[in-house]
């Protein structure tokens, strides 16, 4: 099939290929006209709520004025971008965003893999099911509730963590008031909430490993540790690479909702990230053009990272998104 | 027992048994770490205001009482929020699932011309977006600000769900079935409704669950698009009470202390009340969630 397609264009002229495609389209349209009607609402959704916002992002290059609208407002060139780059807050935001993301990536990427490998070793069905059921559950707690739980458990006055620390003779810590601890609170609470959920993919990958490989490992006298290193880990690799690419592609888009809710005036030194800044400047201060410029900068960096990591992964491991 | 059972099969070395023991210990530790905060919150919610405020609860409820729940259920804001959330969940899920299925099915049919272009058109929105403010402007231009539509429509379709649904259809609806029904003169819509949908219960269950949980837990859209309190979903009400701590006017000191204790307790009860519906249903539907993630991981 592939070879036929590759040979044909050289023999047949381009116009007859075009004609064939048009004929295909006509046939499909005649046969499936109901489908084409059916997809109008969802396609309209994508145009209205995904592509129109992309067009609206031109206000980053304009001085947006509510009365004149997106297209009527005067052009401003790169003014808002320059304002952002020259602003001392620029480096703080970049630094905070990157540090929290990388910290999150380094911790939250390997732990689900370890959990899956551990669960895979367990033979008792009941124990395994219980651990899975319980670790999976926090995933369903909403962000608002999750942040409330963090605040209650870590409160300096009543939080169980501080009470326990007092009993152990340690001093109370204001976890959410200390900019140095904020990142750890964010990252580790996220690990608590999502590890069980993330492990499912890896468990599936492990279940798909060819049993013959385990047989062979056993016959060769591999220990459990060696079996994990030489059978489990290679079996997990494809899934792990895809998830790693996706996480790197999201590195600038970390949990905005959670960070915004966890923020307070004491910890903004480390908790102010690009997304929270965009929200405050844009919607609370109504500085639409500037906030859009900041957000656009963020999206572009994200896209570049995703493309780079994908290319890198394809070269190194032959696994990639596209 | 452990050793005798393993000895019958292949004899495990000392190192392996030690390794397995360490795995069990670590997993038990993980289990306790995840479980403890949940148990603690639940126990606190069932204790008396004074016990909670003095920090005496650490595992089981102290001075068992239901006053926290009474206070929560008597709070008009909470009840309105609950009602609103229920509406958003039902209406939103209905809209989202319908749109996802009618988009994913044509995408799964090889004879549907333009499916690859359409797929790229959809997947691209996963990689790049206009951002918060441009999106806000669209919702505003459409006159959806401060209406219930703002929570139902702008986030209705998740690209990821379209991908897994399409993959499910491709794998589970054989071409022979399509051909046979075409021979019998069955139209595309009829086929979708009377054959595809009944055959796709697992994926539809997954979609319903994912979208419903998403709606139940969402708060940010409500925060930016809704002004009237009467429309606020539960999560936004929760944020006002739990995180922003909006409460209390002027009153006497003893009354203040009581109020403060009550407010502390109410937070725990509120957390339980807000999370319980999802957590109660979850063990029964867990396998669907797992199934959903697995379908999603099949390369399509």
Image (cartoon, coloured by chain):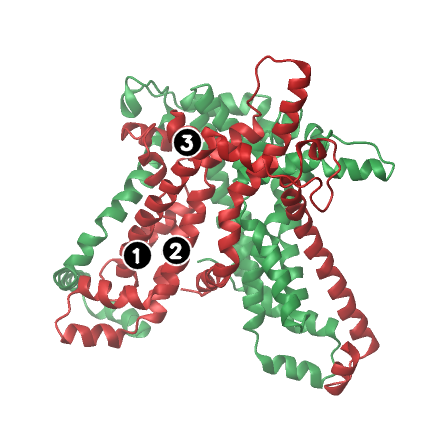
Q: Residue at x 67, y 46 (%)?
A: B37
The answer to whether mark 1 and mark 2 are in CB contact below 8 A is yes
- Same subunit under labels 2 and 3? yes
Which chain does tag 3 point to? Answer: B
The answer to whether mark 3 and mark 1 are in CB contact below 8 A is no
Q: Residues within 10 Å of mark 3 (few under 14, many from 20)?
A: many
Judge from the rendering whether residue B125 lies leftward or rightward of residue A131; answer left or right. Answer: left
Between B240 and B251, the residue placed more toward the observer is B251
Query: Alpha-carbon distance for marks 2 and 3?
Result: 24 Å
Q: Quadrant of residue B165?
A: bottom left
Q: Which residue is mark 3?
A: B232
**SS type, badge 3:** loop
**Which of the two labelled residues, at mark 3 and mark 1, occupies the earlier sequence position?**
1
Judge from the rendering whether residue B23 lies leftward or rightward of residue B102; answer left or right. Answer: right
Q: Residue at x 57, y 31 (%)?
A: B242
**Residue B113: x percent and y percent?**
22, 61
**SS type, badge 2:** helix
Q: Residue at x 58, y 55 (%)?
A: A136
In the current view of this chain or complex, which residue is farthest to the right?
A169
Mark 1 or 2, closer to the camera: 2
Q: Residues within 10 Å of mark 1 (few under 14, many from 20)?
A: many
**Residue B46: x percent and y percent?**
63, 41
Between A105 and A200, the residue placed more toward the observer is A200
Letter of the green chain:
A
Numbered mark located on residue B207 in the image: 2
Q: Is residue B151 above or below residue B119?
A: above
Numbered mark located on residue B125 in the image: none
Numbered mark located on residue B101 in the image: 1
**Residue A57: x percent and y percent?**
37, 31
Q: Can I make out residue B9 in this image?
A: yes
Between A134 and B119, the residue placed more toward the observer is A134
> What is the drawing colour of chain B?
red
């Amino acid at each position: 099939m592939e070879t036929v397609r590759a040979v044909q264009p050289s023999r047949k002229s381009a116009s007859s290929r075009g004609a064939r495609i048009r004929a295909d389209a006509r046939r499909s349209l005649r046969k499936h006209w109901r489908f084409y009607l059916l997809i109008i609402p969802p396609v309209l959704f994508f145009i209205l709520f995904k592509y129109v916002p992309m067009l609206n992002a031109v206000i980053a290059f304009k001085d947006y004025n509510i009365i004149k609208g997106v297209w009527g407002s005067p052009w401003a060139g790169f003014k808002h971008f320059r304002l952002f780059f020259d602003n001392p807050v620029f480096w703080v935001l970049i630094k905070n965003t990157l540090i929290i993301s990388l910290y999150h990536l380094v911790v939250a990427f390997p732990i689900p893999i370890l959990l899956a490998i551990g669960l895979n070793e367990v033979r008792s069905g009941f124990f395994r099911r219980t651990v899975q059921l319980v670790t999976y559950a926090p995933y369903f707690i909403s962000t608002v509730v999750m942040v409330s739980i963090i605040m209650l458990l870590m409160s300096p006055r009543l939080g169980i963590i501080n009470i326990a620390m007092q009993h152990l003779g340690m001093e109370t810590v204001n976890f959410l008031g200390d900019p140095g601890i904020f990142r750890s609170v964010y990252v580790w609470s996220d690990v608590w909430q999502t590890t069980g959920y993330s492990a499912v993919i890896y468990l599936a990958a492990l279940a798909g490993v060819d049993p013959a490989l385990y047989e062979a490992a056993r016959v060769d006298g591999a220990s459990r540790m060696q079996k994990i290193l030489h059978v489990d880990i290679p079996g997990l690799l494809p899934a792990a690479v895809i998830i790693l690419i996706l996480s790197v592609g999201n590195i600038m888009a970390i949990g905005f909702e959670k960070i915004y809710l966890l923020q307070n005036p004491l910890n903004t030194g480390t908790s102010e990230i690009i997304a929270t800044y965009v929200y405050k400047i844009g919607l609370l201060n109504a500085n639409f053009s500037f906030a859009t410029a900041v957000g656009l900068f963020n999206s572009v960096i994200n896209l570049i990272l995703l493309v780079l990591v994908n290319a890198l992964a394809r070269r190194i491991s032959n696994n990639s998104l596209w | 027992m452990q050793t005798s059972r393993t000895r019958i099969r292949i004899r495990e070395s000392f190192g392996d048994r030690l390794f397995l023991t360490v795995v069990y210990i670590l997993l038990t530790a993980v289990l306790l770490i995840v479980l403890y905060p949940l148990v603690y919150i639940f126990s606190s919610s069932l204790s008396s205001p004074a016990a909670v405020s003095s920090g005496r609860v650490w595992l089981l409820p102290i001075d068992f009482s239901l006053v926290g729940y009474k206070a929560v259920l008597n709070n008009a804001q909470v009840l309105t929020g609950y009602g609103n959330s229920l509406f958003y969940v039902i209406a939103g899920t209905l809209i989202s699932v319908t749109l996802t299925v009618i988009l994913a099915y044509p995408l799964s049919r090889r004879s549907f011309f333009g499916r690859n272009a359409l797929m790229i058109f959809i997947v691209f929105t996963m990689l790049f977006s206009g951002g918060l403010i441009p999106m806000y402007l669209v919702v505003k231009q459409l006159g959806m600000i401060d209406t219930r539509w703002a929570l139902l429509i702008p986030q209705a379709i998740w690209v990821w769900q379209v991908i897994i649904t399409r993959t499910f259809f491709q794998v589970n609806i054989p071409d022979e079935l399509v051909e046979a029904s075409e021979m019998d003169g069955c139209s595309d819509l009829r086929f979708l409704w009377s054959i595809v949908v009944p055959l796709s219960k697992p994926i539809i269950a997954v979609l319903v669950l994912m979208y419903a949980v998403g709606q139940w837990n969402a708060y940010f859209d409500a925060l930016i698009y809704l002004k009237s309190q009467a429309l606020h979903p539960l999560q936004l009400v929760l944020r006002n009470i739990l995180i922003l701590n909006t409460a209390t006017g002027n009153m006497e000191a003893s009354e203040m202390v009581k109020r403060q204790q009550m407010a502390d307790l109410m937070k725990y009860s509120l957390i339980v009340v807000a999370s319980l519906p999802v957590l109660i249903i979850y063990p029964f539907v867990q396998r669907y969630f797992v199934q959903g993630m697995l379908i999603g991981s099949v390369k399509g």
